[in-house]
Image: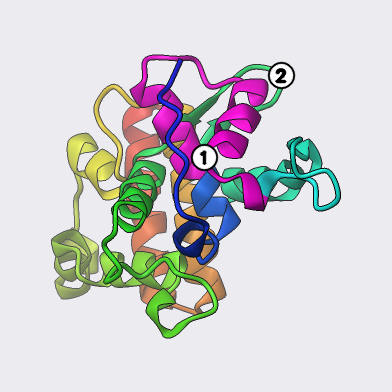
Amino acid sequence: MNNKTEYAVEIYGKIEMQNLIIFAIYSVLKNGETCTFERLVAECFQKFPKVFGFKRYSRWPDSLKFDRPLRTLREKSLIVGGARSHFELTEFGKKIAKETESILLGNRASTLYKGTKLRGRSVDDKLIEYLEESELFKKFLMSPSDFAISESEFRSLLRCTLETPERVLKQNLEYYKKVANAYNEKNILQFLLVCENQFLRRRGK
């Protein structure tokens, strides 16, 4: 079993519930365990009881608190899997988990606090900035008609490795496109569509 660390409510109470769930998945996986739904509920309650317990019966975890956050995390391509099997983190999810861990260990300069000025930019804001600063995007803007991207570059752009399953790549790409569209970033959306078309063409799909 994982260690029984319980963090200070003064710290974890200021972190978004979704980020606490991501960190709990990360913690279970880092311990070499399979993160089933039951294991996730236990980990969250063990580490963050004031957030994941019943209000009137604080000695017990409230599993209903997980439904909406888990759906949102899947939609944002931060996690894969489900309650009927187990959960894994995408590369972007792992980054959020490590940032959350930094806060829990006392790094108050992080940007994940909720309800305070320290919260800073959202995950989606950071994603748009990440894409705008990408050398591949800058290369695309310079010459869209001549732009080409390799599979390794494409996977790196999506924060995936060569071993990452194709379904996770597609999930991450769909989320990137969704965010670009929501922010009305037409150049970024076009860039992602070109990358996608080149990738699918190489796969013969």
> What main secondary structure does the magenta stretch of the protein show?
helix
Amino acid bearing label 1: Lys
Check the image and name the residue furthest to the bottom. Answer: 117
Query: Quick one: label 2, few (<14), some, or many (20+) residues within 10 Å?
Result: few
Q: Residue placed at 24% from the left, 26% from the top?
A: 162
Farthest right residue in view: 56
Badge 1 is on which residue? 47
Residue range of the region highlighted in magenta in the rendering: 22-51
Place of residue 171 in the rendered image (x, y in percent of width and height, measured from the top left): 51, 41
Regarding mark 1 in the picture, which secondary structure is present there? helix
Give the residue type that dot 2 points to.
Arg
- Residue drawn 32% across the image and 44% down it: 198
Give the residue number, with chain letter if any, for mark 2. Answer: 84
Image position, residue 202 (x, y; %): 31, 31
Q: Compared with residue 6, is residue 157 higher up or lower down, i.e. above or below?
A: below
Work out whether 21 lies above or below 121: above
